[in-house]
Image (cartoon, rainbow, N blue to C red):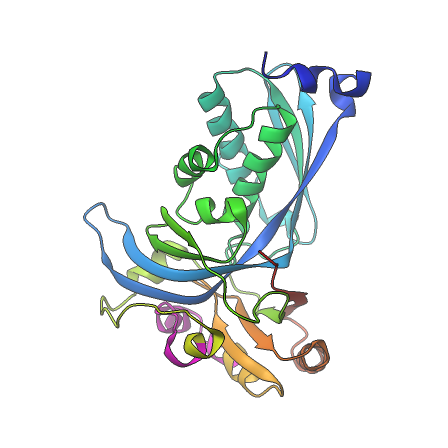
Amino acid sequence: MPHAEAENFAGCPFEARELVETAFAKINLALHVRGKRADGYHALESLFVFTELGDRLTGRICADGQVSLEIDGPFGSLLDAGPDNLVIRAARALQAHLGEDLGADLKLTKILPVASGIGGGSADAAATLRLLTRLWNAPMPPEVLERIALSLGSDVPACIGSIPQMVRGRGEILQPQAVENLSAMPILLVNPGVALSTAQVFGRWDQRDRGPLEAMGLEQLVSEGRNDLEQPAIAMEPVIADVLAALGACAGLRLARMSGSGATCFALFDTDRRMAEAATALRAAQRGWWIAETRIRAA
């Protein structure tokens, strides 16, 4: 029986076992839109990395097959804990795949801004799948979990492993990719307090293929990489250009760019000190912006 361990974890009742997962923030160091596919999705090439910062998901097993969700945290009030939440959808998708009736009481502490281009909802869904396969004692091959993840959203499969990856197609083609000297690099995240619809940003893309993404090293990412959604996002929310300009003026900067469909932008720095100096200056100048200091998560 696949759930024997969960049912008798160290002799404790169901409610006693609590597991924790971090939904690591996803960063698109570059995002090239190559075209629109016949299925309506866009063909992308993007280098994903993840930060040490993320939402926090906890879960306890529930024997009645029900899945409940509580949300708190700085951005928790902006989310609905109903059936359309990606955490609930991920739990239901895994239940359907397993054909089992175990449930869970889940709690999401929302630390990352909502609709901000750093994979918050996708990372939450992936963290849910990781947590529940452990909680329900239902391990499965990564490719199976990634297929379930893809049914939830294009970014969810890459968020399962949360390692540096080249992502192609609509998100179904994943290739681990190490970039020299990138691991544990200081990264500053800045969101000006606006939310953007991914669909609307893609809808404003000018449909020009500006060429493939090559990411053999950081210098190549800086000189040849781009985010093809930056200009459409700026057209919708001009304040994004202000964020990029502010980051571009920081000492010790290696790269400043928007992540995903925005509005969060990121800056890579040579040292923690330079990142801290930039964060201090930005917080003093822009009190309404969300600013977070973190590092790129190691593979």
Numbered range of the magenta stretch: 222-242
* Residue 187: percent from left, percent from top: 61, 70
Residue drawn at the location 45% of the way across and 23% of the way down: 97
Residue 164 vs residue 81, the one in the foreground: 164
Residue reaching furthest to the right: 11
Q: State the image coordinates of residue 124 (x, y, percent, origin top left).
A: 56, 44
Relative vertical location of residue 90 with respect to residue 204 in this rendering, above or below:
above
Closer to us: 210 or 204: 210
Is residue 297 positioned above or below 123 on the image?
below
What x and y, as percent, mark residue 55? Answer: 64, 49
Q: 211 and 214: which one is in front? A: 214
Q: Nearer the viewer, residue 62 or 275?
A: 275
Q: Quadrant of residue 108?
A: top right
Q: Identify the residue at horizontal 43%, vertical 32% (top origin).
A: 144
The quarter in which the N terminus is drawn is: top right
Residue 180 colored in magenta in the image: no
- Per the picture, the main secondary structure of the magenta-coloured stretch is helix
